[in-house]
Amino acid sequence: MTARKAPALRPLADAVNRERRVRLRRRLRMADGIAVLCWLSAAVAVALYIAYGGLAGIADPGAAVSAAGVLAGLAGTDLILIMLVLAARIPLLDRAIGQDIAMAWHRRLGKPALYLILAHVVLLTAGYALGDGSTVADETVVLFNTPDMAIAYLGLGLLVVVVVSSLIAVRLRFPYEAWHLIHMVSYVAVLVAVPHQLSIGGVLADGTGARLYWIGLYVLAFGSILWFRFALPMWRSHRHQIRVSAVERIAPGVVSIHLTGIALDRLGTAGGQYAIWRFWTAQTWWHAHPISFSAVPTRSTARITVRDLGRGSAGISRVRVGTRVSVEGPYGLFTTAARSAPYLAVVAAGIGTTPIRAMLEDSRLGPGEATVLLRATDDSQNYLWGEVAALTRSVNCHVYSMVGRRPPGLATWLSEQALASGVTLASVFPRLAESDLYVCGPQSWADLVVRDAKNAGLPAHRIHVERFDW
């Protein structure tokens, strides 16, 4: 099915594949290093407390329980600050692990951090009560009336609200604005806890290395948030002066929004990436949207393609020519930079075709190097299929389509007809074992493609799925 590379092209192809493998190893080392640093930071926080005599004063059970509470609080606060760093959209993190992985780590740390902070409160209160010979209730009242502790309790309450509401947001698919508001509260929760860290118990006494460490970690976390989430996007939006130049209807409920601006190629967008877009109209200014580029930006033009999936996306499909646009990004590792194998396999469904189209445009494909499967429930969902076909067929690559509903009651990404005909992922992509697989489409559907790819023996680092995580 796949054309062989000409003998003259093999040395070049071998060099490209070696470069991809080197790039993969470098990225995996960076990812491992980042993961180690995340946990090492909590260990450093605990070690500094011990090094500066935190355990020296333990002379009774109350002091031991209190010390355990302090350790839990230090570890929990450290993890929360690491969570802020992971959510800051730092370019180095995006290049190493991708925004979706960074946010997965961010979410994974949420519960341990909360449990540690709750343990901090409970253990300290119990420890102080043991030392004073009072009840836990009486000690809570005393602590609440201690300078800086009232706002520390406020921070705890806000943190509980953030974690619980974040879980609800994930389950109910809150819009980006709701998620953003929730996480703005988390910044407040962390900040209001600072005074009691500096004033209570001498844990972070002036002039100690522990105090310098914590000041540095706070500056890193909040400095990254302020710069990469707010200052840099504002500066870029002002610099590039992006405006809507045309709104093109390409299917029922789907439009391509054409944009113009200054030096848009300086955004550094790779095909397959997305950005956070804000359209400045009375109806849409408050709503930010994670949307993929559907074409690689040129010096003066860019394009995104949007499907009406709710009030927010429906609103931007009606924006007028001339509307000013803010941009945050680009983000994501759903690009050819993540490739490590000589062949490329692509499965896209619905509006998931848009980042695939941009990625293929940005790929330097050799003859027969790529195989693309475009999936739709019916013919109304063939968004940008003609453009994808033109990009791949121009270099003698293969494009297939699969149209039809999935069989009811079966967990499969295939259409009913394809499944009955014995189609499998391996039959569509005969060189799957030598390929990187890129998947983009509805999340539950994409998970089924990934399941089949893993069952076919494809390693995880060769499976790339686009997820618009915040």
Image: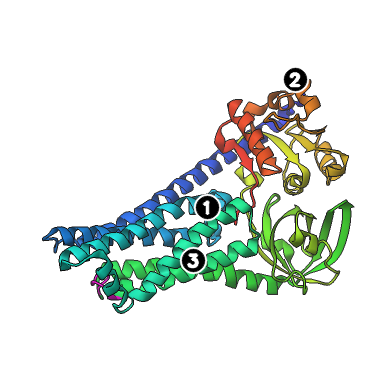
* Residue 6 x, y percent position in the rendering: 74, 28
* Residue closer to the observer: 160 or 185: 160
Mark number, residue 422: 2
Mark before the other along the chain sequence, 3 or 2: 3
Q: Is residue 383 above or below residue 10?
A: below
Q: Amino acid under label 3?
A: Ser
Mark number, residue 102: 1
Specify start and end residues of the magenta stretch as a single range. Answer: 199-205
Per the image, the residue denoted by label 3 is 186
What main secondary structure does the magenta stretch of the protein show? loop
Residue at the spot 74% in from the left edge and 27% down from the top edge: 428
Q: Amino acid under label 1?
A: Ala
* Residue closer to the observer: 222 or 166: 166
Kindly report the distance in space between the C-alpha atoms of the residues bearing marks 2 and 1.
38 Å
- Label 2 vs label 1, nearer the camera: 2
The quarter in which the N terminus is drawn is top right
* Residue 247 x, y percent position in the rendering: 86, 61
- Label 3 vs label 2, nearer the camera: 3
